[in-house]
Amino acid sequence: MAFFIASNIINSIGFDTEEQIGNIESYTTGITDCDSFSGQTTAPIATIDQQKLNSARLHLKETLTRFETLSILSIEKALNNTTVDLNNPGTLLILSTTKGNIELLKTKAPENFDGHVYSAAENIARHFNCHNTPIVVCNACISGVLALLTAKRYLDRGKFHTIVAAGADVASDFIVSGFEAFKSLSGVPCKPFDKDRLGLSLGEGAGTIVLSNKKPTDGKDYIRLQSGATANDANHISGPSRTGEGLFLAASKALQGKTNIDFISAHGTATPYNDDMESMALSRLGLQSVPVNSFKGYFGHTLGAAGIIETILTAQSMLQNRVFATLGLENPGTIEKLNVSNKHTDKELNKSLKLASGFGGCNAAIVLEKNG
Amino acid sequence: MDELKNKLKAQIIEQLNLEDLSPEDFESETPLFGEGLGLDSIDALELIVLLEREYNIKLNDPNKGKEVLYSVDSMAKFILEN
Amino acid sequence: MDSTTLYINQTVKLKDNQFILNNKETLSTKEDGFSPLGKAAYKHLKSLYPKYYKMDPLCKMAFLCSEFILSGTELSDEQKEKTALIFANSSSTFATDKKFHAGIGEIPSPALFVYTLPNILIGEVSIRNGLKGENAFFIEPKFNALLLVEQISTIFDTTDTELCLAGWLDYYDNTNYEGLMILVSRKPDNRILNSEQLNNIYN
């Protein structure tokens, strides 16, 4: 069993979940024009306010990279609401990232490069005095969802009782120029599922969920990670399958034959291909009339953090019985029609599906249940 | 024009790592995508890089891209026009 | 939780300029480095797969290891949907990262960028063989048999996985690389999947 007992989000629209929800409620986006990357792109990017980050990190004594700072802050804030101690042998830290400290390529000669992902993981683990070596998931944009699924799988094995799953990625010249080379960046804040969508908006962020194998006993509503799966399209290394094959397979396995889903948090990057592919997969699953949204219009595609941040927001949606709008959407236009909206609506949500897809043809799906 | 087409063929082979292929193996009117050479979407982006780096021509409109990158012939024509 | 025994049916090691299939040296080159070894292996395997040449060295390593293991095996569509791919390394995609980074100031290459994610090697092997099962890629400071054994066991226990290609593929540069790929299933064999066995094979 895997129950969510605490969480935190840090990105362009907030340093904790409450601030996130406040900005989401007011249809505020963190995707803005960005001078820092003007050499690579003119596309807007959702960066985290540097001054806010500086004051949030004043208490951190070590020299840390931006990536490590974000990760540590997010984990700290999530743990603050618990009695969980990562020094306990029954706990584990699982990290999720696509490029970690890749920025260090700019400042370090190759022979002195200490920006390897495992080094960053060691630095983060040292800060929390982790008893167990952290596990690092590095599987493109499904990393966050896969980290949560891995957490559940380890909790079910009985080896650990509490797992902290944290994902983070920072905006860097490396990542920005890569997506620019793919011509997949939108010149305006992204418009998921819109007929005029132009591409994705990058964002930086960190998200943490603390999972426990014990059901919460504080009398409040809680969320359980019920099931999940991954699958590969076996089609193309960067473009998604036109029939949504891998996502269809992953979601089918995650749903285990049950289609009583109340809400779907899509990957929804707003690229022409991704959104069409998701609509195909959802149609094949018979879920095309279930309310679905993309959160990426609020804070961009946060890569290694996306799966965790968006799962936290899905959980919040369920706890508040509220389907949040797809920000940026004006006129729906995907190959298969979807139940999308650009207005927040109230709806009882007991069971949700979170989807993710990534380069390499990978796809992931998890099912969340309330009070189950 | 022929010299440009031969040069283009060699550049395409190198840019796209088509190691088993040589310029004699395909015609300048062979479609580069789909039925002909079977190039994919990443190859298309790399050909755009090729045009910019070797010929200083920026191709930003994806729809124009399909026309220009149809074959070596169409690429050569585009280069000469710009 | 169903915990039936898992067996290592095939192994390929890539080390010291050699491909070693099931403990028997299968291919080697006198020349030092992965580049000549990879070329020799590709020719030896007669894969006839032009996409090979576009791959970065890490993906070439994965492709070749999987060709040694899977060539001659006919998998049904159902088996392909139930074949998991679980891999780890320490370098992520360091060699390709450096190459891509070097081009940022001029015109960044999309073909290079796509290879700056380690799970692309899973994608390449999946595409080549039509494999649609579970995927996972992990980063570890060094070869960790326990992680692989636990991940593989969990996948078999909790999903409908019937076969698993797994391993450790690390590439820092042409002379600093190593690989181990295994094929795991419930089909009884000499080697049971456990940490001790996997460490023996690796070392």
Image (cartoon, coloured by chain):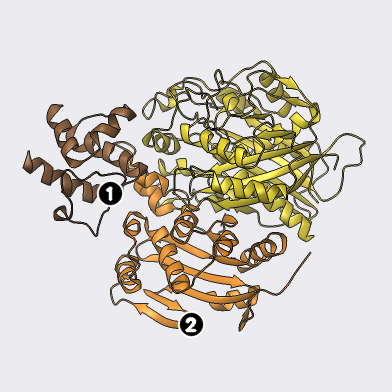
Chain colours: A yellow, B brown, C orange
- Camera sees residue C178: yes
Looking at this view, is B63 or A10 the one in front? B63
Give the residue type that dot 2 points to. Asn
Q: Residue furthest top?
A: A26
Task: State the count of labels.
Answer: 2
**Residue at which label 2 appears:** C23
Looking at this view, is A65 or A46 the one in front? A46
Looking at this view, is A79 or C146 the one in front? C146
Give neighbour class at mark 2: few <14, some 14-19, many 20+ (Cα, 10 Å): few
Q: Quadrant of residue C46?
A: bottom left
Q: Is residue A152 left or right of residue B36?
A: right
| Residue at disc 1, secondary structure | loop
The vertical placement of A16 against A161, above or below, is above
Residue in view at x 42 percent, y 61 percent: C171
Q: Quadrant of residue C38?
A: bottom left
| Residue at disc 2, secondary structure | loop
Q: Which percent across, then down, holds residue C199?
A: 59, 75
Give neighbour class at mark 1: few <14, some 14-19, many 20+ (Cα, 10 Å): some
Residue in view at x 36 percent, y 36 percent: A181
